[in-house]
Image: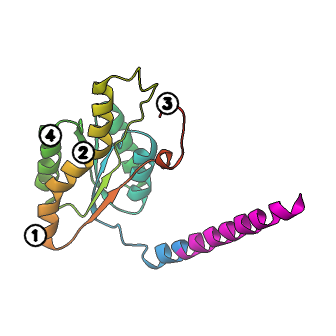
Amino acid sequence: MDRPRRPFVVAAGLTVVGWLIVQLARRQRIKQRSGYFDGKVIVITGASRGIGRELALALARRGAYLVLASRNEQALKLVARECMSANRLIRTLVVQTDVTDDEQLGNLVEKTLQEFGRIDILINNAGIRQGGALTQVDLDTTRNVIQVNLLASMHLTQLVLPAMLKRDKGVIVNLASAAGHVAEPYF
């Protein structure tokens, strides 16, 4: 019985060691570039909770100017206050945005450019998870998942890209769930 387990344990051990090396290298790079986010204008969708909220707080501590977008304006205002508490030197802009609405996405970009004059980093973070038995899930639900998780990111990128290309500068980050790598019943 020991024989089949050893290769797995060794492989798992090497994976952990590799992961640790990557983490140490990443921390070193962050220390070397500690001022990288100072004054950068960063748009975050899905910023009212979860990963989006945590990203906003982490980036606020690093001096980024934040544009926070989601459907829940009250929650966004709370996140903006938390970000300002974390770093009084930053600026925040709250833009209530439903990423499935093309007009609201255009408004998000327009307000950002009016307020800050540029977008340095776009973080497409908004996402939803809905599932069920395929015979039970209606087509509108499926369309909504695709609209939020895929098409909204593509469209917002299309809207932001011209300003970034004009400046020959910018970063676009698309977040996706690890759930796509794990088979799960009804998802």
Asked if residue 76 lies left or right of residue 115, the reply is: right
Q: In front here: 91 or 10?
A: 10
Question: Where residue 102 is drawn, which disc sits there?
Answer: 4
Label 4, label 1: how many angstroms apart (C-alpha)? 22 Å
Please report the residue visible at 10 percent of the width from the left and 69 percent of the height from the top: 166
Q: Is residue 142 above or below residue 34?
A: above
Few, some or many residues within 10 Å of mark 1 (<14, 14–19, 20+): few
Few, some or many residues within 10 Å of mark 3 (<14, 14–19, 20+): few
Looking at the picture, the colour scheme in use is rainbow
Where does label 3 land, which residue?
186
Asked if residue 34 lies left or right of residue 21, the reply is: left
Asked if residue 32 lies left or right of residue 167, the reply is: right
Magenta stretch in the rendered image: 1-25
Where does label 1 land, which residue?
166
Q: Quadrant of the N terminus?
A: bottom right
Under mark 4, the amino acid is Asp
Is residue 169 visible to us here? yes
Q: Nearer the viewer, mark 2 or mark 1?
A: 2
Secondary element at tag 1: helix
First along the sequence among labels 3 and 1: 1
Label 4, label 2: how many angstroms apart (C-alpha)? 10 Å
* Residues at circles 4 and 3 in contact by the CB criterion of under 8 Å: no
* Residues at circles 4 and 1 in contact by the CB criterion of under 8 Å: no
Under mark 3, the amino acid is Tyr
Where does label 2 land, which residue?
151
First along the sequence among labels 4 and 1: 4
